[in-house]
Amino acid sequence: MSSDSREMWAELGLNMGKHDELLSILGKIYPEIYHKQNNRPKSMTYFDFVISEIHGLRVKELIDHKNKGGKVFGTFCLYVPDEIINALNGISIGLCAGTDFSIPDAETVLPRNLCALIKSFYGFKSAKICPYFEVADVVIGETTCDGKTKTYELLGNIHPVYVIEIPHRKNEESFKLWRKEIDKFIEKAEHITGEKLSLENLRNAVKMNNNKRLTLQRMNSLRWNIPTPISGKDALLINQVAFYDDVIRFTDSVSKVADELEERVTKKEGTFPTDAVRLMTSGTPYAIPNWKLHHVVETSGYPVVAEESCVGSRYFSELVNENADSLDELIDNIAKRYFNIHCACFTPNDERLDDIVDLYKKSKAKGIINYTLNFCTPYLVESQKIKERMNKEGIPFLNLESDYGMGDVEQLATRIQAFV
């Protein structure tokens, strides 16, 4: 990183010692996990650059945006409507949450038997290690689980927080509640940005984010070819960067990857042998730099060809209906799109089970690994229903529970190899 970046981090008030240690660790593990892969698409060099500057150039862009009067919204969840933020001259940015590096700081406040993702993001803020936290004007929380909901209370003591209420049943009454929450969020976002939502700006933001999702759909569907033209690790990286990068630049970069993958498919050029056993994953999200599961699976010789995850199919599979004659109708369409995300916070949640089966068939996978973070209660409990459904469908299924630590890597590899 440049001296300009270090000056920027100091001005943001980061704990420079801990931040240097974090970047040093990331600088060592990333080449080991990503650069040693065989036959990577050349277009992945852009995403290598993004990671090399993950706390540098992108943070500077956010600061420049703020200096021009824009606002930055920090988020953790798919239920926060990016279209509304973008239409109000705001930028939505995913916050740091994918490593156990920050967890010891969090455990001075939070209980140890809490999901690693929650402890990770809280530690990043409390220890001042994440520049995205320090740039964000507000963190938009959501009630997808009790652990997050209660932690946002504590986070609100050290950073501005606004929490969106997520209903936990999919019926007409719940949608009315959700629609009111969207209206309240718009009112809050207008207050933060000083802007007023208009049909034209919202329509442009919807189109921009739909284009992003369509491009991700295209790239990810190309993974379903035999042999798969891109590793699961590289596809996961692209899906992760979607939460950080400029929307238009990211869409263009993913389109270039998809172009290259189409050429590879034509040539039957893949990253794994044609007869390699193909696996897909389901379960909890993978925040940067949580690449553990994909790395273990693929270094064992098995390509990951799909993810039913918030950092995967749940992020890009649904579009917002762009056909609307009024602002209120377009907001309705946005509310419907986000309400149709099948998170484990909903009960009952049979639509998610249908999604898993559908993705399994489309991706031509041979088995499913359901990966859940320790103490992630909604996904852990729902794992039993997934197992029952997959057994009924005759789909090979492996349930794994882990955290961000690397101590169980050999055990995971053994279990995956035995499963295959």
Image (cartoon, rainbow, N blue to C red):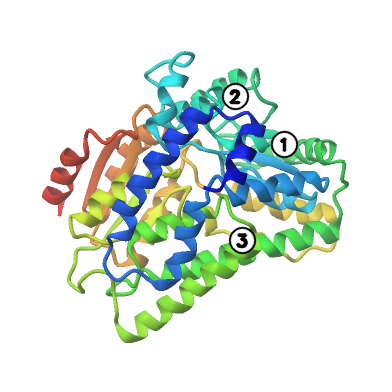
| Residue indicated by mark 1 | 181
> Taking 268 as reference, is 376 left or right?
right
Tag of residue 316: none
SS category of the residue bearing label 2? helix
- Give how far apart the Cα atoms at labels 3 and 1 are: 20 Å
| Residue indicated by mark 2 | 152
Nearer-N-terminus badge (2/3): 2
Q: Residues within 10 Å of mark 3 (few under 14, many from 20)?
A: many
Q: Residue at x 49, y 64 (%)?
A: 46
- Give how far apart the Cα atoms at labels 2 and 1 are: 17 Å
- Amino acid carrying label 1: it is Glu
- Amino acid carrying label 2: it is Tyr
> Residue 158, relative to residue 392: is it above or below?
above
Q: Residue at x 35, y 80 (%)?
A: 265
| Residue indicated by mark 3 | 319
> Residue 382, relative to residue 196: is it above or below?
above
SS category of the residue bearing label 3? loop
Q: Nearer the viewer, mark 2 or mark 1?
A: 2
Classify the position of the C terminus by image quarter: bottom left
- Discs 3, 1 touching: Cβ within 8 Å: no
SS category of the residue bearing label 1? helix
Q: Nearer the viewer, mark 2 or mark 3?
A: 2
Q: Residue furthest front?
A: 3
- 93, 132: nearer the viewer: 132
- Amino acid carrying label 3: it is Leu
Nearer-N-terminus badge (3/1): 1
Q: Residues within 10 Å of mark 1 (few under 14, many from 20)?
A: some
Q: Pinpoint residue 103: horizontal percent, then vertical percent.
A: 42, 25
- Discs 2, 3 touching: Cβ within 8 Å: no
> Taking 120 as reference, is 411 left or right?
left
- 315, 69: nearer the viewer: 69
